[in-house]
Image: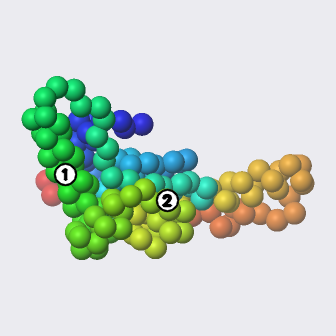
Amino acid sequence: AISADNEFYAMWAALGFTRAPLYTGVTWKAQNQAAVLLAAGQKGHRYSFPHAKIQTAPPVMNRVFGQAVDAQLQANELVYATKYYAAILARATGKPLDVCQEQYLSRKRYFSVKDAYEEGIIDKLVPGYSLNRFRKMRREVLGDREAFSLEAQKPKFRFQREASSS
């Protein structure tokens, strides 16, 4: 779980430097900064389990101690963080910046998997999730008997190497 802006910014910066396909996913809940990181994954590689919940919310200011100037600095940082999160969501969802700031970060908003898909936060369900559950249920009901086979429906992967130029 991400609880501070520093960790969020470090993860966001690290995601920007990766060259390999970047897969992001949510298993149970993605809240606040975790939802922004989920959306920031590479398009086509943002996954979710069918029962997951996703929540966007504006950044919050914790207790501020000290003089009024310190409180003003914290408030300025809060405004900056809100705009930064909105920019990441705008880039991920393809919506305008002001729309993202108003819809996602003005108050808490909860998404089902279907809603998150329609908004452009996720792209796909975790592959094989329902199929694996079906196989387990089939084993429990049929035991070792095979009434039908799913082997023909398994995806076939073919790895091809590029010819070396040397």
Residue 61 lies, in percent from the top left, at 28, 40
Return the residue at label 1: 79
Q: Residues within 10 Å of mark 1 (few under 14, many from 20)?
A: few
Residue at the spot 36% in from the left edge and 68% down from the top edge:
103
> Which corner quadrant of the image does residue 51 belong to?
bottom right
Return the residue at label 2: 110
| Left or right: where 23 falls relative to 137 | left
| Circle number at residue 38 | none
* Precedes in sequence: disc 1 or disc 2: 1
- Label 1 or label 2, whichever lies nearer to me, is 1
The residue positioned farthest toward the top in the image shown: 66
Residue at the spot 82% in from the left edge and 65% down from the top edge:
148
Depth check, front residue: 101 or 63: 63
Residue at the spot 54% in from the left edge and 62% down from the top edge:
112
Instruction: Identify residue type, mark 1.
Output: Val
| The N terminus, quarter of image | top left
The residue positioned farthest toward the front in the image shown: 68
- Evaluate whether residue 36 shows in this view: yes
Residue 42 lies, in percent from the top left, at 32, 60
> How many numbered badges does the structure rendering display?
2
Instruction: Identify residue type, mark 2.
Output: Tyr
